[in-house]
Amino acid sequence: SSTALRELALRHLFTIPPTVVVLTPSGGRHLWLTGPPDHVVPNSAGRLAPGIDVRGAGGYLVGPGSRTRHGAYTVAPGTSHLPPAPCPPALLRLLLPA
């Protein structure tokens, strides 16, 4: 959730950079961030914080324009011109296995 991510950012002293955001038919938000090629970020659901799922190695993203029976995935207004931003180092440390 957006609130959980904001709280995580405040607690761990990082900011989410401007990046492309994909809106899901169910009201979710997918923030697209890149990681360094020498780190393997695992997939997780709720491990980082409640309501935050991570798609990394072996995971997949549903791109804007895709449709499911629930509706279409769309790019959030004002983010379509942005490339996926590099993951902030403090957030990357939280995503990597101990």
Image: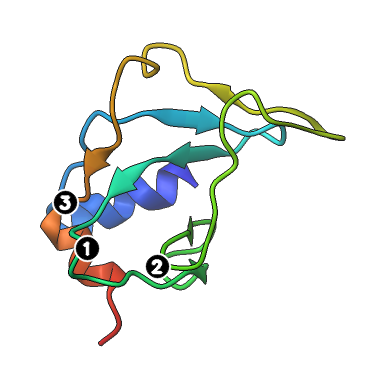
Q: In the shown orientation, is residue 63 left or right of residue 8?
A: right
Residue under numbered circle 3: 88
* Label 2 Cα crowd, 10 Å radius (few <14 / some 14-19 / many 20+): some
Q: Position of residue 29 (x, y in %)?
A: 52, 37
Residue type at numbered disc 3:
Pro
Residue 70 image-quadrant placement: top right
Residue at 42% over, 62% down: 56
Q: Could you say whether the residue bearing mark 2 is in a helix, strand or loop?
A: loop
Label 3 packing within 10 angstroms: few (<14), some (14-19), many (20+)? some
Q: Which residue is mark 1?
A: 92
Answer with mark 2 or mark 3, whichever residue precedes in sequence.
Answer: 2
Q: Residue furthest front?
A: 37
Q: Is residue 43 left or right of residue 41?
A: right
- Left or right: where 12 falls relative to 28: left
Taking the view exactly as shown, the residue that stands out farthest to the bottom is: 98
Tag 2: residue type? Leu
- Looking at the image, which residue is at 22% across and 63% down? 92
SS label for mark 1: helix
CA gap, disc 1 and disc 2: 11 Å
Type of amino acid under label 1? Leu
- For disc 1, the neighbor class at 10 Å (few under 14, some 14 to 19, many from 20) is some
Q: In this figure, which residue is indicated by the disc labeled 2?
A: 48
In this rendering, would 43 be left or right of 82?
A: right
Marked residue nearer the N-terminal end (1 or 2) = 2
Q: Which quadrant holds residue 16?
A: top left
Per the image, label 3 sits on a secondary structure element best described as loop
Residue 64, position as x, y percentages in the image: 57, 27
- Quarter of the image where one finds residue 90: bottom left
The x and y percentages for residue 37 are: 21, 62
- For the residues marked 2 and 3, what is the alpha-carbon distance in whole angstroms? 14 Å
